Image (cartoon, rainbow, N blue to C red):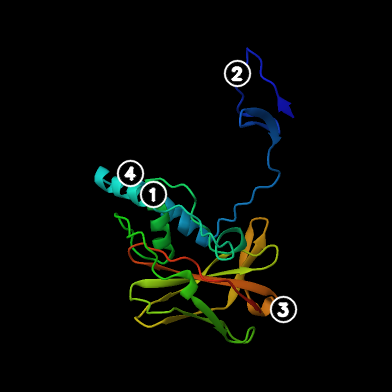
């Protein structure tokens, strides 16, 4: 329902019963409240939410000179990967937003570090990729459901010590969730192997880690990227599909 405001009423906000007053590009309207809102509150969600609060508090305490460095760094970030097969709606790894502020960049870098259990940084990394997306190759070994999947991530070069590979996995069906399923630390060679035993599925506020043995014949997708101890992050690899 559209709302035409009069001279006596210039703005609308708040809720009335099951309706909420909203506006979009100057157009005022009422919308219904969501009938079902889920908030699974998984252990992984709690871990990352806590990290978000810590990062925001830490940024507030930075001196102005360091905040200026983050603002400068943010100007070179904030562009999603142009190849949508690698990142974004068609991939697993979320793209960088197209517009960033210094605090956005600070939180994004430090949330990446937290996901790999690395220490927060107060200064931004050099705005360069660690490893080009075209050089990251995934290969699978293992035969579920009798054993885990072993995914070997190989690059054209070496993976330095202090650089962590993050393996992202998502089931290609409704109710599955894209998430980081494992980490592998670089040791100066050209590859890292990560093993995992299951996938995260669920709905209506209840998410479980389900072993492969309970999901026979399902199709999954995998991607990998790298984050080093400065917070620098590589683009995502190509997507690898497999049937479990």
**Pointer 4 local density, CA inside 10 Å: few below 14, some 14–19, many at least 20:** few
Q: Residue at x 33, y 59 (%)?
A: 125
Q: Which mark is residue 60?
A: 4
- Where does label 3 land, which residue? 217
Q: Which of the 4 quarters of the picture holds residue 117?
A: bottom left
- The extreme top residue here reads 8
Q: Nearer the viewer, mark 2 or mark 4?
A: 2
Specify which label sits upstream in the sequence, 3 or 2: 2
Q: Which residue is mark 2?
A: 10
Q: Earlier in the sequence, mark 2 or mark 4?
A: 2
Q: Nearer the viewer, mark 3 or mark 2?
A: 2
Label 2 secondary element: loop
Q: Are marks 3 and 2 in contact (CB under 8 Å)?
A: no
Q: Which residue is mark 1?
A: 75
Quarter in which the C terminus is drawn: bottom right
C-alpha span from label 4 to label 1 = 20 Å
Q: Earlier in the sequence, mark 4 or mark 1?
A: 4
How far apart in space, not on screen, are marks 1 and 2 (Cα)?
Answer: 37 Å
How packed mark 1 is, by other alpha carbons closer than 10 Å (few <14, some 14-19, many 20 or more), is: some
Residue 88 in sight here? yes
């Amino acid at each position: 329902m559209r709302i035409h405001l009069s001279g006596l009423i210039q703005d609308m906000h708040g809720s009335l019963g099951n309706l909420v007053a909203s506006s979009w590009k100057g157009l005022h309207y009422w919308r219904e409240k969501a009938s079902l809102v889920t908030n699974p509150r998984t252990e992984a969600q709690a871990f990352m939410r806590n990290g978000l609060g810590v990062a925001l508090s830490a940024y507030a305490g930075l001196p102005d000179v360091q905040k200026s460095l983050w603002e400068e760094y943010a100007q070179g970030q904030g562009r999603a990967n142009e190849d949508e097969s690698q990142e974004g709606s068609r991939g697993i790894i979320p793209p960088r937003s197209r517009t960033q502020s210094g605090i956005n960049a600070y939180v994004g870098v430090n949330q990446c570090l937290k996901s790999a259990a690395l220490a927060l940084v107060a200064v931004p990394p050099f705005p360069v990729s660690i490893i080009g997306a075209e050089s990251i190759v995934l290969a699978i070994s293992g035969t579920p459901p009798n054993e885990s999947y072993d995914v070997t991530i190989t690059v054209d070069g070496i993976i330095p010590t202090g650089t962590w590979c993050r393996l992202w996995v998502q089931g290609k069906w409704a109710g599955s969730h894209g998430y980081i399923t494992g980490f592998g630390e670089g040791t100066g060679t050209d590859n890292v192997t990560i093993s995992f035993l299951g996938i995260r599925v669920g709905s209506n506020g209840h998410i479980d880690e389900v072993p492969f043995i309970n999901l026979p014949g399902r199709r999954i997708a995998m991607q990998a990227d790298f984050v080093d101890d400065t917070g620098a992050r590589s683009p995502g690899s190509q997507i690898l599909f497999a049937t479990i």
